[in-house]
Amino acid sequence: MRRRLTENSRIYTTKHVCCELTTPQKKIKLTAQDAAEDFIQGMESWNGLNVPHEVLRALRDLKFTEPTPIQAQVLPHAIRDRLDIIGAAETGSGKTLAFGIPLIHSILQYKTREARDIPNTALDEDELQSSDESFKEEYEEFNVSAEGQGEERKEEIAEDNDEELDTDEREDISNEMPDDEESDSDETNILQEGEIGLVKVIDNADFTWLDNDHDSAKVTLPNRSPLALVLEPTRELAIQVRDHIKAVAKYTGIQVAAIVGGLSQQKQLRILKRCPEIIVATPGRLWELIQEGEPYLSQVEEVRYLVVDEADRMEEKGHFEELSKLLELINVDEKKRKQRQTFVFSATLTMVLPGPRRVMKKKRQNMAENQKLEMLMGNIGLKERPKVIDLTLKTGTVSTLTEAKINCTVEEKDYYLYYFLKLHPGRTLVFTNSKDCIRRLMSIFTLLKCQPLSLHADMHQRQRLKNLERFTANDKGLLLASDVAARGLDIPNVQHVIHYQVPHTVENYVHRSGRTARASKEGLSVMIIGPDDTKNYRKIMHALNKDDDLPMFPVEHQYMPEIKVRVCLARQIDTKEYRWEIDFR
């Protein structure tokens, strides 16, 4: 494995072997003039928000030249004032970076303090001798591995990194390496393939300069536990958030890892051995690893920064039992809890909305906003006076979203869905309330040559991710999804959201509709309302303070006879195929 060699590296020696061990210095040396030029070149809008320079460079690469409203509101209070944050904004508003940037800033400051507080004089002769011996053993072991097992090691690294990215297709090892190991500067000397990766052998090296520089070098110790923990309700959202944070942290050397269910546990354990500073996790897999005694998670209560994303969904009683156990463990030490900075984010945090009876009991249905906030503060461990930033509209949906409805019978729903897909092509996300409905629609619309993809909880993780990638790559893609896809997924440029079945809760309607009209773009949300959907529809309209009905979606009825013929034929074929499968079994 390649290792970066820099001028600021700490040097350890064993006889004629010189080993250079990277210390956490800034990878790119920038002058004050360089920094000033960055702001001149289109990043002035971020000035005054205390964003680290390394993050600004990454934001510029991503063409995020202006902060979103939630970011502009959160960053000063989170970074400058170091307050706990309760944030609420419409989906697609940039909530991930609103907490991701403060995490990166705080970790960079923490590492700087750690490096300053561990001078070289703290390493006595015994420690230096121990370091020499350990590096010598590692060097000898690596030589044996390089001679006899080089190819096997390469395959293991490739396999590990392949799992970390959670993709179905294996990519280049160079793309899988942590960002701090990629070549991006002329100042850096990288050991190329064919050379020894851990050490560089120098014959008759002159070490007279070592004593002179001994007092100035700094060494940071590996983390005993994660510095930041981000909890997400779904696997897809955790992976997405990890990727977003990695993108803005690429110049910092900070490692970000996703720990989720549905993937190889052994390979995720290998990821944890790298001691990533930020862990993005689902509660289930994280709690499982803690229970099994994973060393890096054994002191999770020492985490310095905690984020609970999609808090309204995470807080549903009985929905995530592991979350309560995790929060109890994390907050077991009152002193550490008070020192911790906590973020709570959601699209509908302060909207008081009744959920399913099995989840939210009657005593919670009339809960006031301040009571809901107090409940979150108690369970998550927020300090007494967090900064509450609520940018949600009374209607719960963004102004760039156009909402409409189609009234019809249950039998006609297939007709109108097919009509919409044929006459209004574009990247379309169709939501249903059940997996059985998705399977039926998959069969019918495959026969109609609409090339549908599916996304629901029963699918294997790899297949779900693969379908998301295929849908994202097709500007006329069709994705049939259950509400597992509605929570926070950032699928770019979704033009239409169709509610084939009206959702049971207002939260789900807001999150479904939030998959389109993101980042100030236009989007369309259409509800196909059958007789059984009327009650839920009225409940949603009332909760969103919509006094008037949604407008009717315009339908050109001259096309409907041909539409019905095609759909009925597809239904007949589907029915016969289904019966044949039953008989065959």
Image (cartoon, rainbow, N blue to C red):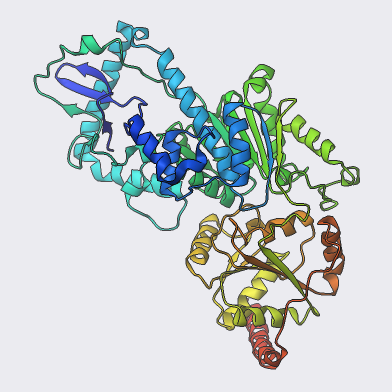
Tell which of 168 and 101 is nearer to you: 101
Tell which of 129 and 504 is nearer to you: 504
Tell which of 493 and 377 is nearer to you: 493
Q: Position of residue 407 (x, y in %)?
A: 80, 77
Q: Quadrant of the C terminus?
A: bottom right
Q: Quadrant of the N terminus?
A: top left
Where, by quadrant of the figure, is residue 191 drawn?
Answer: top left
Which residue is at a point 12% across and 16% down the rendered structure image?
206
Q: Position of residue 441 (x, y in %)?
A: 65, 75
Q: Is residue 186 left or right of residue 87?
A: left
Total of numbered circles in the picture?
0
Where, by quadrant of the figure, is residue 98 drawn?
Answer: top right
Which residue is at a point 42% across and 43% down the rendered structure image?
58
Which residue is at a point 43% across and 13% down the rendered structure image?
117
Which residue is at a point 48% across and 24% down the rendered structure image?
109
Q: Is residue 20 left or right of residue 339?
A: left
Q: Is residue 57 visible?
A: no
Give the answer, above or below, for where 537 lies relative to 153: below
Looking at this view, name the residue that lies furthest to the left.
204
Where, by quadrant of the figure, is residue 382 drawn?
Answer: top right
Q: Is residue 544 visible?
A: yes
Q: Position of residue 326 (x, y in %)?
A: 66, 33
Q: Position of residue 493 (x, y in %)?
A: 55, 63
Q: Is residue 469 left or right of residue 454?
A: left
